[in-house]
């Protein structure tokens, strides 16, 4: 499946959805317009969009300009389709 | 589930509850405001109050962006949505917020092309795919959400998209906190700071609260243990006579915030001289509009909007709820005329609204409060 990035069509065969909403559905219900953001993992690095996966396994593009560069496995916090922070989780 | 279960451990929650109780001074009542609607949601969903002693009262703040949108702005949005050839986009919760004459959902039912999106980037995509239509995004939210609108506008400008515009209703968190601190209606002991807003603005902007008002602020995460730990940190500060800004949510919130996000916010937006907040009235320099550089994308300049102030329905007490003066269930229409299905006030619309959180998850707490009354 492809989606249109800023620089034209990018081939992202692993993407299962082409909407920025794909990684916005929080386990607790989607609270897109509030102060709630969703933790995701980068599975396909890229700029300006990287493919990320949320805790439910949903994948979708995420705008990563504010935290770039990103690598596979990086943990990000996504709100409204863009990554606003990196996660420094130590468990 | 990794990264989730660790922050929902019941045994740790009980321990934190006991520690908080041990720190509470006998005979003293503590009023702690959680500023953010996301925290309100967590508190009721996970029954956080059940772990707290009765002397620690959580008061809900104005941090739900849907809840603070005044009816007049909804009407302004509706007037644009009714224009021919317009695709009007907004976040899902916004569609049900009643204006003076119905909601965006009503206008959609009448035939207007109103669509909800999860990201302004999706609205941009709609604009790309519909070059013969005018696509408008109704932007709401605090500093958490404003960067996504800013990035979208930067992409629109780079792509020279002429059929995309934004009706900007972004608000900032510090001015309403100042307004609350100056309000004679409300006396608070401390604040639970908004976690994800702070991801962008950092912790420094709250330093005036301990410095000028002598109250602790602890920036908190959104899992149950995050909230309990932040209440514990507040209680420890109060017990030790300290007033500081502390960051409980260090795994996400850098002290300085996201400098790149702050930089683009400065480039794309400028402060409005004043903005109306539901329940709080007009607050100066509390909202954003598009900067001169992005004026071409300003929907308010592209269309004529009524810009009329609409008074809230008399029965609705959202104002008092947003200021933490009354509990949601103390509102006359709570759960009767006003429900999530047929909301009268905005606090019942958004899942982050204090009324909706109480309605959905807090009935047990409510019956307990009633039993104690």
Image (cartoon, helix red, strand yellow):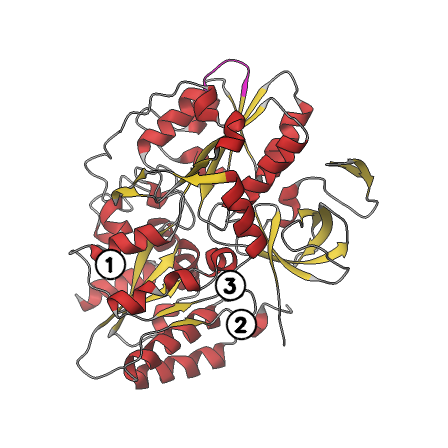
Q: Quadrant of the C terminus of chain B?
A: bottom left
Vertical arrangement, residue B21 with respect to residue B102, above or below: below
Q: Residue at x 32, y 29 (%)?
A: B72
Which circle's residue, 1 or 3, is located before the other in the chain?
Answer: 1
Q: Mark 1, chain letter?
A: B
**To which residue does mark 1 refer?**
B181
Q: Nearer the viewer, mark 1 or mark 3?
A: 3
Span of residues in magenta: B81-86
Q: Secondary structure at mark 1?
A: helix
- Residue depicted at x 25% and y 74%: B54
Q: Mark 3: few, some, or many residues within 10 Å (few <14, many ≥20)?
A: some
- Co-location on one chain, circles 1 and 2: yes
Mark toward the start of the polypeptide (1 vs 2): 2
Instruction: Please identify, in this view, whether the residue under mark 1 or under mark 2 is nearer the observer.
Output: 1
Q: Chain of mark 2?
A: B
Label 2 CA crowd tier, 10 Å (few <14, some 14–19, many 20+): some
Predominant secondary structure in magenta? loop
Residue B168 screen position, x and y as percent: 45, 34
**In the rendered image, which residue does mark 3 sit on?**
B256
Residue A59 percent across, percent down from the top left: 71, 50
Residue located at (56% from left, 51% from top): B261
Callout 2–callout 3 Cβ contact below 8 Å: no
Q: Position of residue B110 (x, y in %)?
A: 45, 18
Q: Is residue B99 left or right of residue A5?
A: left
Check residue B85 for magenta coloring.
yes
Are dots 1 and 2 in contact, CB under 8 Å?
A: no
The reply to whether the magenta stretch includes residue B95 is no
């Amino acid at each position: 499946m492809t989606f249109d990035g800023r620089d034209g069509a990018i081939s992202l065969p692993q993407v299962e959805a082409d909407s920025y909403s794909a990684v916005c559905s929080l386990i607790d219900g989607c609270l897109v317009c509030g102060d709630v953001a969703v933790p995701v993992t980068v599975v396909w690095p890229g700029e300006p969009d990287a493919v990320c996966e949320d805790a439910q396994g949903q994948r979708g593009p995420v705008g990563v300009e504010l935290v770039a560069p990103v690598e596979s496995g990086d943990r990000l916090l996504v709100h409204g389709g863009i990554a606003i922070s990196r996660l420094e989780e130590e468990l | 589930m990794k990264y989730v279960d660790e922050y929902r451990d019941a045994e740790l929650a009980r321990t934190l509850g006991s520690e908080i109780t041990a720190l509470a001074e006998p005979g003293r009542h503590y009023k702690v405001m959680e500023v953010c609607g996301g925290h309100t949601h967590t508190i009721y969903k996970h029954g956080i109050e059940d772990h707290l002693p009765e002397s620690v009262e959580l008061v809900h703040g104005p941090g739900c962006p849907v809840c603070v949108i005044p009816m007049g702005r909804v009407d302004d949005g509706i007037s644009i949505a009714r224009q021919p050839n317009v695709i009007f986009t907004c976040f899902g919760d916004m569609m049900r917020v009643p204006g003076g004459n119905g909601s965006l959902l009503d206008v959609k039912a009448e035939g207007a092309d109103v669509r909800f999106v999860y990201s302004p980037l999706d609205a941009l995509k709609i604009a790309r795919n519909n070059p013969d239509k005018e696509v408008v995004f109704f932007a709401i939210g605090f500093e958490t959400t404003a960067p996504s609108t800013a990035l979208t506008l930067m992409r629109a400008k780079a792509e020279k998209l002429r059929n995309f515009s934004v009706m900007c209703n972004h608000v900032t968190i510090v001015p309403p906190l100042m307004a609350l601190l100056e309000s004679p209606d409300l006396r608070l002991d401390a604040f639970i700071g908004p976690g994800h807003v702070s991801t962008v603005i950092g912790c420094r902007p709250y330093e005036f609260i301990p410095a000028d008002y002598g109250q602790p602020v602890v920036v908190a995460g959104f899992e149950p243990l995050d909230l309990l730990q932040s209440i514990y940190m507040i209680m420890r500060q109060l017990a030790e006579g300290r007033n500081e800004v502390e960051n409980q949510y260090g795994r996400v919130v850098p002290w300085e915030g996201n400098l790149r996000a702050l930089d683009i916010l400065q480039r794309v937006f400028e402060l409005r001289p004043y903005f109306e907040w539901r329940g709080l009235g007009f607050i100066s320099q509390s909202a954003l509009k598009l900067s001169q550089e992005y004026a071409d994308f300003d929907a308010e300049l592209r269309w004529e909007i009524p810009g009329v102030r609409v008074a809230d329905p008399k029965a609705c007490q959202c104002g008092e709820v947003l200021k933490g003066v009354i509990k949601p269930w103390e509102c006359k229409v709570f759960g009767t005329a006003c429900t999530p299905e047929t909301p009268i006030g905005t606090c019942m619309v958004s899942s982050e609204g204090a009324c909706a959180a109480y309605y959905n998850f807090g009935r047990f707490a409510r019956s307990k409060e009633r039993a104690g009354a």
